[in-house]
Image (cartoon, helix red, strand yellow):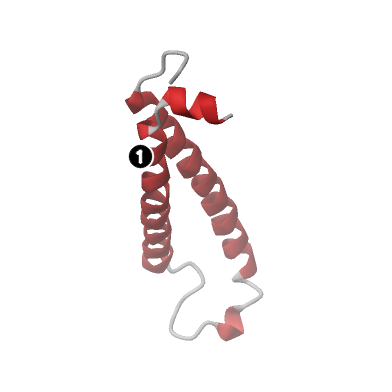
């Protein structure tokens, strides 16, 4: 912000970095879960290997939790006074 960024830009930057990391983790997790379900067939009771509603619900829940977890630090970063931050460093 001391170099000209607006509060909205800082907010979007922090939020997008957190969400990007979550989506990468979610993609890797989904790929691994689809591979590992073949080995865990005996442990899945009442759920098929490729249960789309369950996978969708868990993915949506993880995205929502990530959004909430990134929102507060992003809001705090957008409120930082650049002069105070530079003086602290």
Q: Residue furthest right?
A: 39
Q: Report the front residue among 18 and 56.
A: 18
Q: Quadrant of residue 31?
A: bottom right
Q: Does residue 46 appear left or right of residue 32 in this picture?
A: left
Which residue is more in the foreground, 51 or 28? 28
Vertical comparison of 86 with 31: above or below: above
Compared to residue 87, the image places residue 75 above or below, namely below
- Report the number of discs: 1
Query: In percent of the image, x 64 and y 68: which residue is there?
Result: 36
The image quadrant of residue 88 is top right
- Does residue 25 appear left or right of residue 56 in this picture? right
Residue found farthest to the front = 87
In this view, 85 is above or below 73? above
At x 45% / y 22%, what residue is drawn?
Answer: 83
Residue occupying the far top of the picture: 4
User: Which residue is located at x 62 percent, y 78 percent?
Assistant: 40
Judged from the image, the secondary structure of the residue bearing numbered disc 1 is helix
Towards the viewer: 55 or 68: 68
Query: What percent of the width, then of the height, locates residue 30?
Result: 54, 57
Q: Residues within 10 Å of mark 1 (few under 14, many from 20)?
A: some
Read off the residue under disc 1.
Answer: 75
Q: Position of residue 18 (x, y in %)?
A: 48, 43
Quadrant where the image shows the N terminus:
top left
Where is the C terminus found, in terms of image quarters?
Answer: top right
Percent x, y of residue 25: 56, 51
Residue 33, percent from left and from top: 58, 64
């Amino acid at each position: 912000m001391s170099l000209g960024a607006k509060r909205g830009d800082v907010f979007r930057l922090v939020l997008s970095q957190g969400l990007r990391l979550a989506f990468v983790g979610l993609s890797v997790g989904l790929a691994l879960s689809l591979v590992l379900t073949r080995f865990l067939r005996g442990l899945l009771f009442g759920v098929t290997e490729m249960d789309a509603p369950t996978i969708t619900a868990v993915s949506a829940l993880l995205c929502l939790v990530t959004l909430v977890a990134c929102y507060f630090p992003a809001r705090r970063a957008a409120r930082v006074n650049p002069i105070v931050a530079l003086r602290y460093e």
